[in-house]
Image (cartoon, helix red, strand yellow):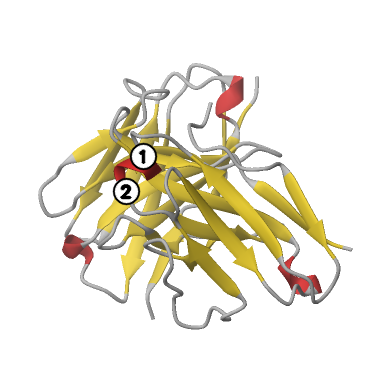
């Protein structure tokens, strides 16, 4: 069982904005460990989308943005496009384990 | 370019062991930790373990602790993940990943499918 909870699915029409939450606790996100976000398209390896809460690697469109308030982090996708369909995961560190922990994953559907 | 290339698919029987390799290129191997992540069919990502090629430090997920061993060979820039006492629910795609400065996995291998079947 993951200690980082995400909504199972979110959806939106092309051009709309969707937000994915990643809810943790005081032993991970609340303890100020960084949150990172990944996009996984069908049949491919995960791709780093956001690192260290709110930074985009080179080549990632600025439609993707990350934020981290309190014990929850969030990923926003603005101007949703058909190519954004896939699964999205958050990643952080948990001091109780101790070790990396992934979120439960969210499927994004473009209507 | 920076890349991680993993070994090919494996089919194993329950109780056997499997060893998956991951060859790194395009960066200084010893200066980056490497991690292993798996994904069972239709499921999410699961962290398995981590190793520092520089210090030999390892960290393993509680779920697989005692069955998983992650090692490195700095002469060939290779990371290995060995999983023993295989069970049917170990069937998954196994990924290696490079771990960046702030503990993010920034470069991923292509994945290795391990099937446990009798």
- Residue at image point 62% right, 45% down: A105
Q: Is residue B8 visible?
A: no
Badge count: 2
Residue closest to the eye, B82 or B64: B64
**B97 shown above or below A15:** above
For mark 1, give the secondary structure: loop
- What separation in Å lies between label 2 and label 1 (alpha carbons)? 6 Å
Q: What is the quadrant of residue A17 in the picture? A: bottom right
User: Residues at badges 2 and 1 in contact (C-beta under 8 Å)?
Assistant: yes
- Residue at image point 84% right, 73% down: A14
- Residue at image point 42% right, 34% down: A25
Q: Is residue A35 visible?
A: yes
Residue closest to the eye, B2 or A11: A11
**B115 shown above or below A106:** above
Residue closest to the eye, A91 or A76: A76
Chain holding disc 2: A
Lateral position of residue A59 relative to residue B47, left or right: right
Q: Residue furthest right?
A: A111
- Residue at image point 17% right, 57% down: B74
For disc 1, the neighbor class at 10 Å (few under 14, some 14 to 19, many from 20) is: many
Q: What is the quadrant of residue B115 in the picture? A: top right
Q: Which mark is residue A33?
A: 2
């Amino acid at each position: 069982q993951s200690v980082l909870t995400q909504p199972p699915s979110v959806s939106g029409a092309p051009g709309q904005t969707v937000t994915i939450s990643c809810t943790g606790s005081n032993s991970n996100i609340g303890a100020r460990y960084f949150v990172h976000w990944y996009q996984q398209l069908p049949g491919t390896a995960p791709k780093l989308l956001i690192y260290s809460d709110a930074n985009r690697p080179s080549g990632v469109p600025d439609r993707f943005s990350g934020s981290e308030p309190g014990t929850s982090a969030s990923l926003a996708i603005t101007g949703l496009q058909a190519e954004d369909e896939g699964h999205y995961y958050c990643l952080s560190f948990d001091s109780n384990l101790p070790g990396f922990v992934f979120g439960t994953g969210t499927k994004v559907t473009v209507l | 370019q920076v890349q991680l290339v993993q070994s090919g698919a494996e089919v194993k029987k329950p109780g056997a062991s499997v060893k998956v390799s991951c060859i790194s290129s395009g960066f200084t191997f010893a200066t980056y930790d490497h991690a292993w992540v798996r994904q069972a069919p239709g499921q999410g990502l699961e962290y398995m373990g981590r190793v520092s090629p520089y210090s030999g430090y390892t960290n393993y997920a509680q779920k697989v602790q005692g069955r998983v061993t992650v090692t490195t060979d700095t002469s060939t820039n290779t990371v290995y993940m060995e999983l023993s006492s295989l069970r049917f629910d170990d069937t998954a795609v196994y990924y290696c990943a490079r771990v960046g400065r702030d503990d993010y996995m920034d470069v991923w291998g292509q994945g290795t499918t391990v099937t446990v079947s009798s």
